[in-house]
Image: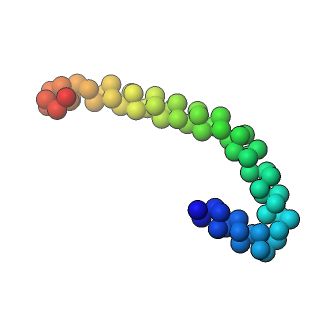
Amino acid sequence: MIKFILWCILLVLCWPLALAVLIVYPFVWLMLLPFRLVGLAVGGVFHLMWSIVVFPAKLISGRL
């Protein structure tokens, strides 16, 4: 919602720039999508590694 309000303010102040942002934003989102997917995969690997490290402690404490 904040992005939309900021875009509306930009539309009032400088409408050509606002229209350029409206056209360019989907392409930037598509270009950044692989980095988001890599971040998700790396986060999943770190979560898996943490689960493997903590698993013996959970077995000993009986919280499993």
Q: In the rendering, at what x and y percent does residue 49 appear?
A: 39, 27
Left or right, residue 59 beside residue 13: left
Q: Which quarter of the figure has residue 16?
A: bottom right
The x and y percentages for residue 3 are 64, 61
Q: Residue at x 18, y 25 (%)?
A: 59
Vertical side of 49 occupied by 8: above or below: below
Question: In the rendered image, which quarter contains the C terminus?
Answer: top left
34 left or right, relative to 53: right
The single residue placed furthest to the right in the displayed view is: 16
Residue 9 picture location, percent across and down: 71, 72
Q: Name the quadrant of the N terminus.
A: bottom right
Residue 23 position, x and y percent, is: 80, 52
Residue at x 67% of width, y 67% of height: 6
**11 up-or-down from 40: above or below:** below
Up the image or down, 41 lies above or below 30; here it is above
Judge from the rendering whether residue 22 lies leftward or rightward of residue 38; answer left or right: right
Considering depth in this image, is 54 or 6 the residue closer to the camera? 6
Image point (73%, 47%), residue name: 26
- Residues 33 and 3: in front is 3
- In the figure, is residue 25 to the left or right of 58? right
